[in-house]
Image (tube, rainbow, N blue to C red):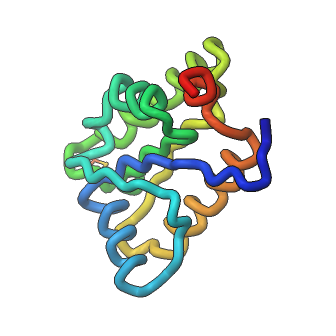
Amino acid sequence: MKDELFEPVIVVFCCRWAAYGAADMAGINRLSYPSNVRIIRVPCSGRVSPLHILQAFRLGADGVVISGCLEGGCHYVDGNLRALRRVRQLKKMLDAIGLGGDRLEMYFVGSCNLDKFANYLREFTERIRRLGPNPLRLREG
Ligand code: FES
């Protein structure tokens, strides 16, 4: 079901060192990103477990983004790369269970990349709008 009025709920796990800073600066600079985005600050993208992601979907998120430091910039050495590996595995699992791996994405963002951050979120929101609502949400209805 692809409702024209459908406004997807997007949960974004933001590393506090980079992506969260970009989100904060985007807000301060009145740079708009979609209002349907819910930002959750985490110490490092590597701290986001598959359970956090699956729980977000179970509670009705239509899309989930993990946003970590740029490659080579993780404060915990390789948390962002571990997060990327997890996201790749989970995408396959989401495809296998029919939820759709495209509902999950990982972006690397520097704390000064306000435009990039806002663009990623706009593009991702459009992608989810095309996919339609989370089928789990429809089932619980
Ligand atoms: S500290 Fe930012 S992704 Fe690890």
How far from the left and from the top, in percent, is residue 23?
38, 68
How far from the left and from the top, in percent, is residue 7?
63, 54
How far from the left and from the top, in percent, is residue 106?
50, 44
Q: Which quadrant would residue 73 be assigned to in this image?
A: bottom left
Work out which residue is located at the far bottom of the displayed protein and give it.
29
Specify whether 116 is left or right of 102. left
Task: Tell me if I can see residue 86 in this picture.
Answer: no
The residue depicted at 38 percent of the width and 35 percent of the height is 83
Answer above or below: position of 29 versus 116. below
The residue depicted at 64 percent of the width and 13 percent of the height is 96
Q: Nearer the viewer, residue 21 or 4?
A: 4
Q: Nearer the viewer, residue 71 or 91?
A: 91
Answer above or below: position of 14 versus 99. below
Specify whether 128 is left or right of 41. right
Work out which residue is located at the far front of the displayed protein and give it.
141
Specify whether 115 is left or right of 124. left
Task: Tell me if I can see residue 70 in this picture.
Answer: yes
Answer above or below: position of 64 versus 94. below
Position of the N terminus by quadrant: top right
**Total residue callouts:** 0
Work out which residue is located at the far top of the displayed protein and give it.
96
Q: Nearer the viewer, residue 81 or 13?
A: 13
Answer above or below: position of 107 versus 141. below
How far from the left and from the top, in percent, is residue 56?
41, 34
Position of the C terminus by quadrant: top right
The residue depicted at 60 percent of the width and 36 percent of the height is 103
